[in-house]
Image (spheres, helix red, strand yellow):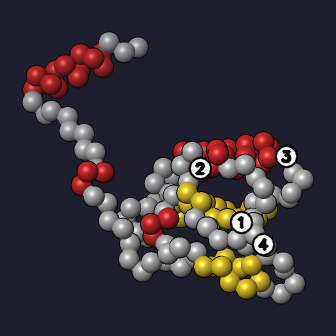
Amino acid sequence: MPQLLSHVVIGAVYHPPSADDKLMIAHIVNNLDTITRSHPHAGIILLGDFNKLRDAALLSYPLKQVVKSPTRGAAILDKIYTNIHEWYDRPAILAHIGQSDHNAVFMKATGTRPTQSSSDITVEVRSQDPNSKALLAQAISNVN
């Protein structure tokens, strides 16, 4: 597992054209919330047939939709949302598989993994001098 990630979570979605957008978005966001509460440094890849699902909530999660070419006719219905897009090349659109009328989407890892820049690291240091320890002890004793 790359050092910058604790887990990689992959979710597959099928959103039928006649389904309720609000229910689907609520379900996806609730699951993302549950996962990220337990694993705040998880990489997320959410993929599938989203049809015409309004994705503003996913984009503000923040996830990036990386499929930029049509997957069925002139429409982009098959999408990939991720928070680790820099780890992958732009997805390729391939010929359909079997009887499907959707093209296949292929996303390949870049082969190099990004490194975290020093500006992204937050370090909190507490003073260890006797005065600071006494102030901490006093603050703790005031808490019921």
Q: Residue 88 placed where, x, y %? A: 49, 72
Q: Earlier in the sequence, mark 3 or mark 4?
A: 3
Q: Which residue is mark 1?
A: 76
Q: Are marks 1 and 4 in contact (CB under 8 Å)?
A: no
Q: Residue 18 placed where, x, y %? A: 90, 53
Q: Is residue 103 above or below residue 65?
A: below
| Residue located farthest toward the right when viewing the structure as drawn | 18
Q: Residue 24 placed where, x, y %? A: 77, 48
Q: Residue 76 placed where, x, y %? A: 71, 65
Residue type indicated by callout 1: Ile
Q: Is residue 131 above or below residue 38?
A: above
Residue type indicated by callout 3: Asp
In front: mark 1 or mark 2? 1
In-image side of 129 versus 19 (left or right): left
Q: Earlier in the sequence, mark 1 or mark 3?
A: 3
How far is mark 1 from mark 2, CA to CA? 16 Å
Q: Is residue 43 visible?
A: yes
Q: Are marks 2 and 3 in contact (CB under 8 Å)?
A: no
Q: Which residue is mark 4?
A: 72
In-image side of 30 versus 64 (left or right): right
Q: Earlier in the sequence, mark 2 or mark 4?
A: 2
Q: Which residue is mark 2?
A: 59
Q: Earlier in the sequence, mark 2 or mark 3?
A: 3
How far is mark 1 from mark 4, CA to CA? 7 Å
Q: Is residue 66 above or below residue 109?
A: above
How far is mark 1 from mark 3, CA to CA? 19 Å
How far is mark 2 from mark 4, CA to CA? 22 Å
Question: SS class of the residue under badge 1?
Answer: loop
How far is mark 2 from mark 3, CA to CA? 18 Å
Q: Which residue is mark 3?
A: 20
Q: Residues within 10 Å of mark 2 (few under 14, many from 20)?
A: some
Question: SS class of the residue under badge 4?
Answer: loop
